[in-house]
Amino acid sequence: MRRISLLTGALVSALSLAPLAQGDGGYRLVPNWPTLPAGMYFGLKDAPPPPAEREAQAAARRAMGGQRAAQSGTGGPTNQPGISGLAISKDDLIYVFNRGPKPVMVFNTAGQMVMAGADQDINGKAINPSWQHSGAVDWEGNVYIIERDAHRIVKLSPKMDRFLMQIGTTMEKGNGPDHLDLPSGIAVLKSGNIVVTDGYGNNRVILFSKDGKFIKQVGKGSGGPGDKGTGVGEWTLPHKLAVDAQENLYIIDRENKRLQVYDKDLNHLREIKNEKWYPWDIGISRKGDDGFAYIADHEGERVHKMQLSDGRLVATWGSQGLGPGQFDWVHGIVVDSHGAVYAADTYGQRLQKFVPSSSSR
């Protein structure tokens, strides 16, 4: 079995180096989508500074704050504004996890906002939108929010008006069954079981039951902050993930620049690598049976359409920038039942919709 797995990985890597379709990738931007109600916005009300200025500010923060963070033990990722991630319901409602006044904003495919919320106190603590790192919607419409820097995931009712459950212990990091350390991604299976990538602090992927009980984890050693690795079932920042029709899990191993593929019970199946990519998110339709995934790629700020069978990239579009069809830290991606692709960026503070060029939608 080990030899077959290695051969499969080599085949996936070889096939994935095929030339990419360039230009618009066969997709066109839907203009003026979505329509935000008056007074609503993604991220900061005023746009963040341009890249060069951001880099200078970040360098200054590192120089001034590194020693303080080391002394206090409270280091962690620098928060970025804008949109931290996307999810999509079985009814094609697009959930935007927003680092802004409304932590969750929900749109229909026409671009109309139909709901917004999660700005109330939840389980004794208000959501800090600058701490968000995406979330999920389960098959019953319940909403899960990753409050990364509070080391917890909260589950809300479909209208986001009732707290239902929490995974992790608020403001306490760890790598035991009841703690998380800067969690990064989540997917919910049809059974209600929950898969969490515990990636910015720890290096593990965890399977929980529907009621939030620990079932198993995959990682090197205990999967703690120092347990980084490049082997099968090892991680260097497991980031986000998506699920296909068979409920196979396509998990981004971000700093290893690969996907590791598992079944719904967290048994390893294969890996997918591509040359010169830096995947941050992956989207597969809720139906999950068309054979494709979409990758939000920070390398060059672009989107790829990828064949699930062999990892080959069959289309690519996007570039660094703030113009139409460009991205500035593309960090969230989903696809609806009609094949429309929605991609969001953090510093760009935008959500853009792309449809196949031949589509009339």
Image (cartoon, rainbow, N blue to C red):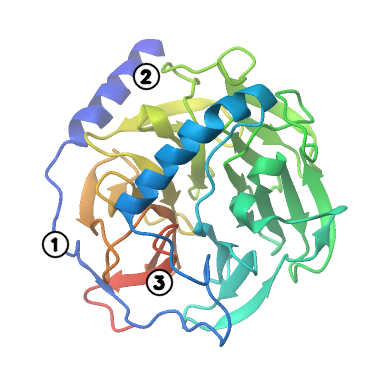
Q: Percent position (x, y) of residue 236?
A: 47, 25
Q: Nearer the viewer, mark 1 or mark 3?
A: 1
Residue at 38% x, 70% y is 352
Residue at 32% x, 60% y is 327
On the image, numbered disc 3 is attached to which residue? 338
On the image, numbered disc 1 is attached to which residue? 23
Q: Is 136 left, or right, of 161 in this rendering?
A: left
- Residue 262 seen by the camera: no
- Image quadrant for the N terminus? top left
Distance CA(mark 3)–CA(mark 2)? 34 Å
Q: How dense is the environment of label 1, judged by Cα within 10 Å: few (below 14), some, or many (20 and up)?
A: few
| Residue sticking out furthest to the right | 124
Q: Which secondary structure, mark 1? A: loop
Q: Which secondary structure, mark 3? A: loop
Q: How dense is the environment of label 3, judged by Cα within 10 Å: few (below 14), some, or many (20 and up)?
A: few
Q: Percent position (x, y) of residue 271?
A: 38, 29
Mark nearer the N terminus (3 vs 2): 2
Distance CA(mark 2)–CA(mark 1)? 35 Å
- Which amino acid does the dot numbered 1 rest on? Gly
On the image, numbered disc 2 is attached to which residue? 5
**Cβ atoms at labels 2 and 1 below 8 Å apart:** no
Q: Percent position (x, y) of residue 185?
A: 57, 43
- Which amino acid does the dot numbered 2 rest on? Ser
Q: Nearer the viewer, mark 2 or mark 1?
A: 1
| Residue sticking out furthest to the bottom | 38
Count of numbered badges drawn on the protein: 3
- Residue 139 seen by the camera: yes
Mark nearer the N terminus (1 vs 3): 1
